[in-house]
Amino acid sequence: TTSLMWFRRDLRLGDHPALQAAAAEGQVVPLFVLDPRLAGSGRRWERLLASLAALREETDGALVIRQGDPAEVVAEVAAEAGASQVHVSTETNPYGRRRDAAVERRLAAAGIGLVGTGSPYAVTPGRVRNASGDPYRVFTPFLRAWREHGWRAPAGDPQVEWMTKLESDPLPAHSDQEAGERAALHRWEDFRAEDLAGYATARDRPDLDRTSRLSVALKFGEIHPRTLLADLDAHGTGASGEDVERFVAELAWREFYADVLWHDPGSAWRDLRDGLDGMRYDEDPELLEAWKSGTTGYPFVDAGMRQLLGEGWMHNRVRMVVASFLVKDLHLWWPAGARHFMDHLLDGDMASNSHGWQWAAGTGTDAAPYFRIFNPVTQGLRFDPQGDYVRRWVPELRHLPGAAAHEPWRHREGLAQGYPERVVDHAEERREALDRLAELKESR
Ligand code: FAD
């Protein structure tokens, strides 16, 4: 028999449970639907196309690409192929769940099944629960339970017989860039060999740039987290137990946020917890624009925002600092910032992004309490001690040596190359944020 493998966030062939399930049934038609609803970020769309080009190669050109609404396209292609089943990796994000429900209904009407096997996570969201069967809202106990739950060993590489006779739409033109399963595996090997040792401390230093940068590959499913976890178990890494533990914990954050979003899909764009309901936020297009363009006058913040625009990626430490700055120094509600991140991040992922933002804003899981406010200058001095990260991204500060780049206003020629004055005063805005919190508490 013939079955359809509908790829989504799983653009690889190795360690792919759904593809294994499809291949076990006979010939496989590999399909990707270019759904205009996912075109949101131009940059991420381009990256997707590059990944599809790689997947097409991996499938010896068999990949069928069609544009349109998945509810129609999947049923059409299944009929053309004479497929009796459509295989997918289970999707757990809000849009994907709604989409899959619609596709499933459409297929059922034609007597075709939609079969979900595996997911983009080591443990499928919804599975890790406490003794009373409830989900976790705090990371550390989740981490413990997630480890105890465990995951299957990776599936090997399947022997797949591709069906090649179906027509594909052309793959839209796109820029050449690192993408695809092979590139992801290389990146992972390089990271293990070179940067995992020391990760536990170096991961916080944007100037050193020693994190894996696998977030983009994980976002598109070019590599599965289970592959990473199994490799860490199987190979001596030369890294300390602490480094490995720390890396595993970071992967677990991704799983945790997916779990939280699965239980509460509405938390993609509204506060997860109601503790700050009624908080007074501003709407200030000018300040928002200064933040977006990296011209707030705070070097560490601006370097991060310019890295985002330049690379479509930002270091985690800086993501936390710029998020805190938007909410606590500019008093803007977190979705304004989360939206901008989703517009530009190559790794833009609803669960990690919205809940990363909510963590910083004090409205999410396990949140840093609202009153703990990052100081953008001391954060910079601590995590970019020589100012190298700032100078990399902010040319107007390149004339300032060492840590001086973090406080140009303290140096005579500091603003001479066109770097802007600070748009707000951190000490004042910190007090303002705390006043708003007090006001909220009094109003209750
Ligand atoms: P590494 O340090 O090498 O970590 C390995 C992997 O663990 C990452 O690839 C990622 O999959 C996962 N991970 C690490 N840290 C986190 C974390 N804090 N939360 C969830 N997963 C994590 N990550 C995204 O993948 N997509 C997003 O849209 C996203 N938005 C964020 C928004 C904010 C405000 C914050 C504070 C964090 C956000 N993160 C997001 C998490 C984190 O910043 C990135 O995953 C990380 O910087 C990616 O770089 P890396 O692959 O080199 O990370």
Image (cartoon, rainbow, N blue to C red):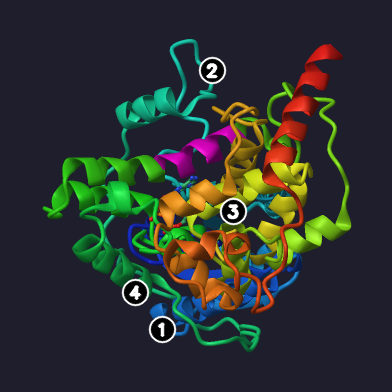
Q: Position of residue 104 (x, y in %)?
A: 67, 49
Q: Are marks 2 and 1 in contact (CB under 8 Å)?
A: no
- Taking the spot 65% from the left edge, 85% from the top edge, the residue there is 172
- Taking the spot 29% from the left edge, 72% from the top edge, the residue there is 186
Give the foreground label among 3 and 2.
3
Count of picture labels: 4
Q: Secondary structure at mark 2?
A: loop
Q: Are marks 4 and 1 in contact (CB under 8 Å)?
A: no
Q: Position of residue 62 (x, y in %)?
A: 48, 80
Q: Nearer the viewer, residue 439 or 172?
A: 439
Q: Amino acid at mark 3?
A: Asp
Q: Report crowding for label 4: few under 14, some 14 to 19, many 20 or more residues within 10 A (C-alpha).
A: some
Give the foreground label among 4 and 3.
3
Label of residue 134 in the image: 2
Q: Secondary structure at mark 4?
A: helix
Q: Which residue is mark 1?
A: 60
Is the residue indicated by label 2 positioned so its CB lies within 8 Å of ligand 1?
no
Q: Amino acid at mark 2?
A: Asp
- Taking the spot 34% from the left edge, 61% from the top edge, the residue there is 210
